[in-house]
Amino acid sequence: MIKTALAHAVVAVIIQLLLGQLIGYTAAGAVAVAFYTSREITQHEYKLGIHRGWVWGEKLPIKPWEPLVKGWSRDSALDVMAPAIGCAAVAAMPIPTLLG
């Protein structure tokens, strides 16, 4: 849903603004986007595993690269792209840091 993607973007920007005071806004944005990217990849791992008959406690029956290339819908792509766009916009702004 687009509401989910926008909520992810807002949370990512909040993470970026809070963490940006310590490590810089560009690096903080990268951390926030990496969080949502890893979250989507993990969701794809479990969806592929369940589709193939996986049950909890067994090894996932997928190859390591499969969650990166399979199972991406428009919504899951938006869940990564919206935080990336929001964080890129914040990183492009001249925001002074409290520690600088």
Image (cartoon, rainbow, N blue to C red):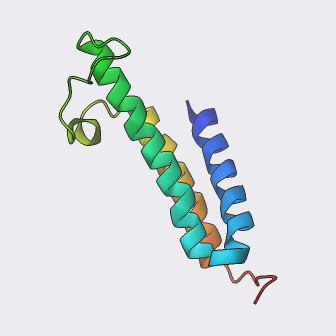
Q: Is residue 88 left or right of residue 49?
A: right
Give the residue displayed 21% in from the left and 40% down from the top.
64
Name the residue: 50% across, 41% down.
Answer: 79
Judge by depth and name the residue closer to the eye, 49 or 59: 59
Which quarter of the picture shows residue 87?
bottom right
Rendered position, 84 above or below 17: above
> To which quarter of the image does residue 74 belong?
top left
Q: Residue at x 69, y 84 (%)?
A: 94
Which residue is nearer to you in this view: 64 or 82? 64
Residue 71: give x, y in percent of width and height. 30, 30
In the depicted structure, whether residue 34 falls above or below residue 39: below
Examine the rendering and report whether any part of residue 64 can be seen.
Answer: yes
Location of residue 29 with respect to 25 vertically, above or below: above
Image coordinates for residue 51, horizontal then vertical, percent: 28, 14
Q: Nearer the viewer, residue 78 or 53?
A: 53
Residue shown at 17% from the left, 34% from the top: 63
* Farthest-out residue, left: 63
Residue lying furthest front = 57
Residue 24 visible at all: no
Which image quarter is the C terminus in? bottom right
Residue 76 rendering spot, x and y as whole percentages: 43, 36
Which residue sits furthest right? 98
> Residue 30: percent from the left, percent from the top?
51, 65
